[in-house]
Every structure is written in structure tokens, then in C-alpha cells.
Image (cartoon, helix red, strand yellow):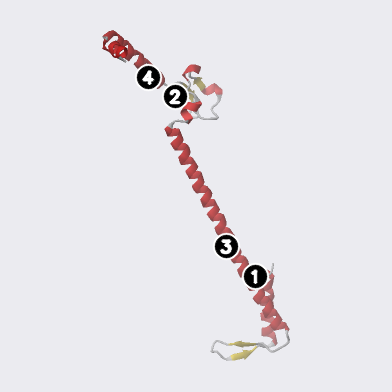
Amino acid sequence: MRDACRSLKNPARSALLGLGLMLCLSASAQAQWKWVDRAGVTQYSDQPPPPGTPARDILARPAAHAMPAPAATSSSPAAQAVRKALQQHAQREARQRQAQKQAHELQAQVQAEQRRQMCEQAQQQLQVLDSGRRVRQVDASGQPVYLGAAQIQAQRAQAQATAAASCR
């Protein structure tokens, strides 16, 4: 430790160390990729061009030793945070899809139950209308009224249509 401190006190060594550090930092800060995008604009970046960029449009690539190791970038805290956020987003979407699926299933069950009840009511009405007995209804004033043959036939046609639509 003392030797390191002594070497930093030497101005020449400090200058060399600073220059070396600046060269390392500036080399990594330079754009390593150069390509022409779809609009014909030349792009410079330390990241590779987007997938699907033709090889003829890539004008410069980084040197092999300057490429960062994929494992180093994927385990960085920022990459982990992005990966975690993407996982949480995917989980939220999956929960929403599941909730929507359950809502659709519940709605389908409710509709099936309503159809079953309408079918049952139409069949009961057809049994009453086909029984040969007199059919009585209550009119708007609350008085009982017996249906004639034409009215029974009209109600029978309506009950048959309801049964055909509901009893599938």
C-alpha cells in the first residue's frame, strides 16, 4: 500500500496513470458500430444495429477484444432490474388474461342457464297449450280472460320459436 502511495506522489507516474486511465475510458466511450438505417441515415452506437439490418448496411463493427462479455451485461443490476420488471409485466398480463377468461366463462355459464330456463318455460307453455284445456290469462285490468283458438295458435307459434332458439 505504501509503495502504491509513493508511486502516486511521483508526478510522472501520476501523469502516466491518468493518461492510461483516460485512454481506457475514451476507447470504451467511442462508438463501435456504424450502420445505415432504413431511412438512409448513418447511425453510430456502442450497441449493435437492430435485428434485420442487412450486412451490407453495417459499415463498421467493434474489434473482437472490445466486445463486452454477454454474461457481464446480463448480470448487471440494471439488466436484472429490467428483467424483473419484464417478468412482473408478463405476470400481470397473464393474471389479466386469466381474469378475462374466467369472466367469459362465467358469462357463458350465466347465458347457458338463462337459455335453459327459457327452454324449460317454453316447453311448459307448449304442454299447457297442447293439453286441450282452456287457457286463461290475466288482462291489463287484472281480470281473467280465456284465450280463443286463434290466440292459442299464436301463443303456440311463439312458444315453439322460443323453444327452438333456447333448447339447443
Q: Which mark is residue 46?
A: 2
The residue wearing badge 3 is 107
Q: Amino acid at mark 1?
A: Arg
Q: Residue at x 60, y 64 (%)?
A: 109
Dot 3 or dot 2: first in sequence order is 2
Check disc 1: other Cα within 10 Å, few if <14, some if 14-19, many if 20+. Answer: some
In the rendered image, the vertical position of residue 141 relative to residue 158, given as above or below = below
Q: Which secondary structure lies at badge 2? A: loop
Nearest the camera: 131 or 109?
109
The residue wearing badge 1 is 116
Between marks 3 and 4, how big is the CA–CA gap?
Answer: 62 Å
Check disc 3: other Cα within 10 Å, few if <14, some if 14-19, many if 20+. Answer: few
Disc number lying in front (4 or 1): 4
Q: In the rendered image, which quarter is residue 27 located in?
A: top left
Check disc 2: other Cα within 10 Å, few if <14, some if 14-19, many if 20+. Answer: some
Dot 3 or dot 1: first in sequence order is 3
Whole-percent x, y for residue 99 in the image: 53, 55
Q: Are marks 3 and 2 in contact (CB under 8 Å)?
A: no
Between marks 1 and 2, how big is the CA–CA gap?
Answer: 66 Å
Between marks 2 and 4, how big is the CA–CA gap?
Answer: 13 Å
The residue wearing badge 4 is 25
Q: Is residue 155 left or right of residue 83?
A: right
